[in-house]
Image: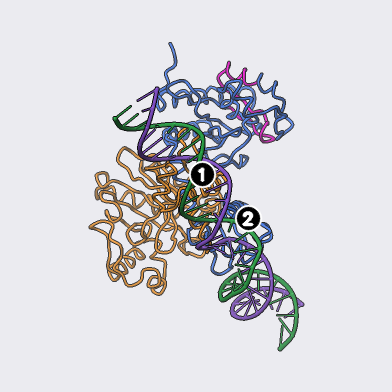
Chain colours: A orange, B blue, C green, D purple
Amino acid sequence: MISSVKKALELLKIFSTDQPELSLTEISKRMDLHKSSVFRILNTLESSGFIEKDPLTKKYRLGLELLNLANKVLSRYDLRNQAGPYLEKLARKTGEIIHLSILDGNEMVYLEKKGQGQVLTVATHVGGRNPAHASAMGKILLSDLSRRELKELLGEGPLKKLTTNTITEIPKLLEELERVRRQGFALDNEETFPGIRCAAAPIRDRNGKTVAAISVTVPKQRMGKQRIKEICQLVIETARLISERSMGWETSA
Amino acid sequence: MISSVKKALELLKIFSTDQPELSLTEISKRMDLHKSSVFRILNTLESSGFIEKDPLTKKYRLGLELLNLANKVLSRYDLRNQAGPYLEKLARKTGEIIHLSILDGNEMVYLEKKGQGQVLTVATHVGGRNPAHASAMGKILLSDLSRRELKELLGEGPLKKLTTNTITEIPKLLEELERVRRQGFALDNEETFPGIRCAAAPIRDRNGKTVAAISVTVPKQRMGKQRIKEICQLVIETARLISERSMGWETSA
DNA sequence: AACATTGTTGCGTATTATACAACGCTTGTT
DNA sequence: AACAAGCGTTGTATAATACGCAACAATGTT
């Protein structure tokens, strides 16, 4: 492990959407490093395009080179490109936010987000992640794992509680995953975000293995009993189309 | 400048969309560093989520943490979010690829790309960049700069030649920029990519300053004289709407 | 089975990252 | 206007470590 490299990478993570610009002194304080050390790290990051310095304010911000690298990450996922048109169509049909995600460890990671949403919406983003057990897409992704794999990923619990509705006991989650397997879709009833409901369905490859999930995210005000049914049907149908047309999955006769 | 940090950052840049996965030995050769040094850099990058190691193949690839950072970069640009719906509408109307870009040094950088495109399309991506002088959007962005600023950015020339149509002499470019100022839009007639034409228009802020550009990119087979006129009108109109509604620009009476 | 190649680790030392002090500049205070 | 405080920048000595070597483990090839 190389400590100066570690420091540089952790520095990059300090920036946030709330605080996109920071001064040398702020960074020095946050990292508990001498300002001359921070100064040299910043210069190195800047020379490679990972950080930009505003010449007027002397403040630093993340650099555009990160967009290039992110593009390379995303380009690995053919599914994301192939699913794009289907997700856009679903967004137009429902008027809501659509996500595509994969499992990474015990979290699900958003790979795509479509739809403009309305005034009341969710602040998720590509690259963002949430505990798998708490979200509809996460439950879809977990439901394809074996008991052994689940035990390895989730441990003994209790699981992280995000809202009062989050499932935290392992037995209860396993029950829920069994239900998800049977019905072929999952719901998130304010388990990740208060006031937000979500319906998700699996994307399967040619071998029938769940490789990703898609979801429709809706504020509960717009998600009554009747609408849940509509939304679930649309999500399942879209997921099936993507699985068949892009992944080569064949539903049995 | 911290040399070990520089090496780590340059390592991240080695990956490409053509080669998303590399072995330790490949990286060591490419960077002309000892494999044990590369091994430790990779471990450090992995521990911070910037690199992932496939446990089966032992190959390395870029990590998902980069998506988070990229999202933070993009979230700085309110314009990108606000312009999104207009760009999607333009993509649907034209059936072509739409870009939003800004100037960064003497290059223009894509901040957004909309539209699925057809079989014949351009392999551009968010974060990607091209020399400003060669592209329609680049000419729009350059046309708002003063003579002094242009001289500083472009130098004495000749400018980089990407195709046989690329403008490489400074006087000719200045002439072209004058024309762009007058007509309020720019065209790229196979100047960046062979076989690809492009029409662009400026996004202006409340002070009338050009802060970004949008464009429609079309293979020349689908871009005859009549269609050029249509496309130009649509691009100009969309750019004006974004400028007025999202940026507070007011066209004089 | 034998050999070649790749990945991993311990360790000595050549190299450098770190932090200190000082300086220049900008901003804030009186 | 004068002064103080704080921020950013730089030179440099040295404490700390990154580097590469050698050896080993694991994997692939013959």
Task: Classify mark 2: residues with Cα within 10 Å, few (<14), some (14-19) or many (20+).
Answer: few
Q: Return the residue nearer the eye: C24 or A16.
A: C24
Kind of element beneath mark 1: strand
Q: Which image quadrant for residue B245?
A: top left
Location of residue D19 in the rendering, given as x and y in whole percent from the top left corner: 63, 62
Per the image, is B44 magenta? no
A74 to B204, vertically: above or below: below
When asked about the image quadrant of residue B147, the answer is: top right
Q: Is residue A29 left or right of residue B37?
A: left
Task: Residue B218: name its quadrant.
Answer: top right
Q: In the image, is B29 to the left or to the right of B82?
A: right
Which label number is shown at residue A51?
Answer: 1
Q: Is residue C17 above or below residue B153?
A: below
Chain for mark 1? A
Q: Position of residue B212 (x, y in %)?
A: 51, 29
Where is B11 relative to B241, above or below? below
Magenta segment? B176-199
Q: Which residue is located at x 53 percent, y 31 percent?
A: B94
- The residue drawn where x is 63% and y is 52% is B18
Q: Name the subunit of mark 2.
A: B
**Residue on which disc 2 sits:** B19
